[in-house]
Amino acid sequence: MTVRIAPSVLSADFCRLGDEIAMCDAGGADWIHVDVMDGRFVPSLSFGVKVIEAARRASTKVIDVHLMVVEPERYFDDYVKAGADVLTIHAEAAPHLDRQLSRIKALGCRAGVALNPATPLAMIEEVAHLVDVLLIMSVNPGYGGQQFIAYSVDKIARARRLLDQVGSGAVLEVDGGVSRDTIHRCWAAGADTFVAGNAIFGAPNPQAEIAILRNLCVEQV
């Protein structure tokens, strides 16, 4: 199973954002994760078009945009134009998932759905065959540096079974509290893509930390 490490620029040094992204790019990151927060769906405010454009200029890797916003369809065209390769929207904020996933795909972008910790997998059962990325939140979204919610591991395992049952090749991504202490459990449960913010940007050597996290995604004896 392919393992992807996706540094979250929410934890980067904003004064050196381009350099930080380029450093992750050169250090073996597979995706660059950009959190867009509107202060309504989640308490915080964060990035918009300009940061996505900056990430696109600084990196050759997949730009993975996570829309923690209400009415996400308002942003699709601008964010794809800015350089997003993946647009992930929250099931809780998108009552018309079929339409919105289809629209993202029509724009030439990979379409993802995110589920908050308390949101059941049943929310996406009917559209699982349309999803390119299923993102399991292992913290409550809105802030970096939160503690991993342990019961997320069982949800990841059930999400893997759901994707397998519908014959989906979708990426199964985990976001929140991913670190040396938690990544192996998530991988063993079936996740293949891991968003890490503080674990990478707070490390003494962020590039080395990317490799360490990747190397933990192996069978342990």
Image: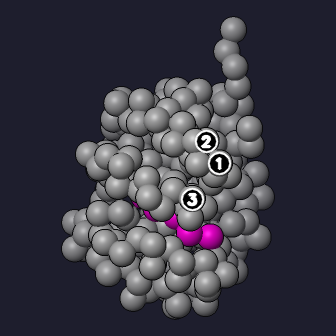
Q: Are marks 3 and 1 in contact (CB under 8 Å)?
A: yes
Out of 149 and 51, give the one closest to the viewer. 149
Q: CA distance from mark 3 to mark 1?
A: 8 Å
Identified at 32% across, 46% down, the residue is 120
Which of marks 3 and 2 precedes in the sequence? Answer: 3
Residue labelled with disc 3: 129
Segment tinted magenta in the rendering: 110-114
Here the colouring is one colour
Q: Main secondary structure of the magenta part?
A: strand
Q: Quadrant of residue 99?
A: bottom left
Identified at 33% across, 35% down, the residue is 149
Q: Are marks 1 and 2 in contact (CB under 8 Å)?
A: yes
Q: Which mark is residue 167?
A: 1
- What's under tag 2, amino acid-wise? Asp
Which of marks 1 and 3 precedes in the sequence? Answer: 3
Out of 135 and 159, give the one closest to the viewer. 159
Q: CA distance from mark 2 to mark 3?
A: 10 Å
